[in-house]
Image (spheres, grey):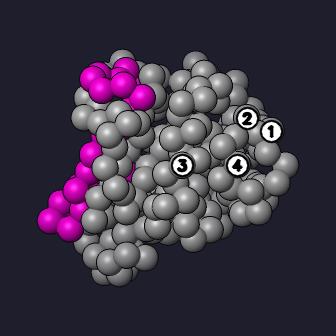
Amino acid sequence: MRLGVVLYDDFELLDAYGPLEMFGCLAEEIETVVIAENKGPVKSTPGPKTLAEYDFTDAPELDLLLLPGGIGTLPALENQNLLTFLKTRCPQIPINMSVCSGSAILAKAGLLDGLRATSNKMFFSLASSQSDKVDWVENARWVDAGQYVTSSGVSAGTDMSLAVIDRLFGAERAQQIAAYTEYQWHTDADNDPFVKYLNQADAGAG
């Protein structure tokens, strides 16, 4: 299997690397590749850069896709090359995952129409305003809608990834990975303790 993480400038670092750490424990079963509009280093919101090996023209076939959120979501929502790539490729991929405001981009691309989805609670309206054809779920750590799996903010992507690993490889394997990484897996998808911060972006400041 091959997992492709799609990056853009000012993506949130943990949105990408939390899930990649979990899937990286399956390196014998899952190859990971990094894709961006242009090959080369892509800057994250906190600063560290990640090298994109592929661009939108030569990205390989994928079994899994991961789209992080971050401050860069706002310009990404207007990036027609990114939206076109997602519109073209995601329907062909068995499992597409988003973390945080990544679901806003999927919604803008029309890929979540008719599906349940969630997003970062502090910036929930950013995602929900992109499409009224999506059944936006406020109190959800992540939502598994089959081909599209969306998670709440930042650390929730790691919980979502373990849930996808559970789906693909079984609960025992997912629990082993959580133990190996010393990660306390939040296993209840329908209970998000951060819903109390719904659309309160200033609650995370300071």
* Marked residue nearer the N-terminal end (2 or 4): 4
* Marked residue nearer the N-terminal end (4 or 1): 4
Determine whether, in the image, residue 178 is placed left or right of residue 131: left
Q: Which residue is mark 2?
A: 126
> Mark 2 and 1 residues: CB-CB less than 8 Å, in contact?
yes
Q: Residue at x 73, y 35 (%)?
A: 126
Residue 125 picture location, percent across and down: 77, 38
Q: Is residue 111 above or below residue 100?
A: below
Q: Quadrant of the N terminus?
A: bottom left
The secondary structure type at the circle numbered 1 is loop
Please say whether residue 204 is visible from this viewpoint: no
Q: Residues within 10 Å of mark 2 (few under 14, many from 20)?
A: some
Residue 194 is covered by the magenta coloring: no
Q: Which mark is residue 88?
A: 3
Q: CA distance from mark 3 to mark 1?
A: 22 Å
Q: Residues within 10 Å of mark 3 (few under 14, many from 20)?
A: few
Q: Amino acid at mark 4?
A: Gly
Q: Residues within 10 Å of mark 4 (few under 14, many from 20)?
A: some
Q: Residues within 10 Å of mark 1 (few under 14, many from 20)?
A: few
What residue occupies the far right of the structure in this picture?
Answer: 132
Q: Which residue is mark 4?
A: 110
Q: CA distance from mark 4 to mark 3?
A: 11 Å
Q: Quadrant of residue 138?
A: bottom right
Q: Is residue 169 above or below residue 132?
A: below
Q: CA distance from mark 2 to mark 4?
A: 15 Å
Q: Residue at x 36, y 57 (%)?
A: 62
Q: Which residues are magenta?
A: 16-44
Q: CA distance from mark 4 to mark 1?
A: 12 Å
* Marked residue nearer the N-terminal end (3 or 1): 3
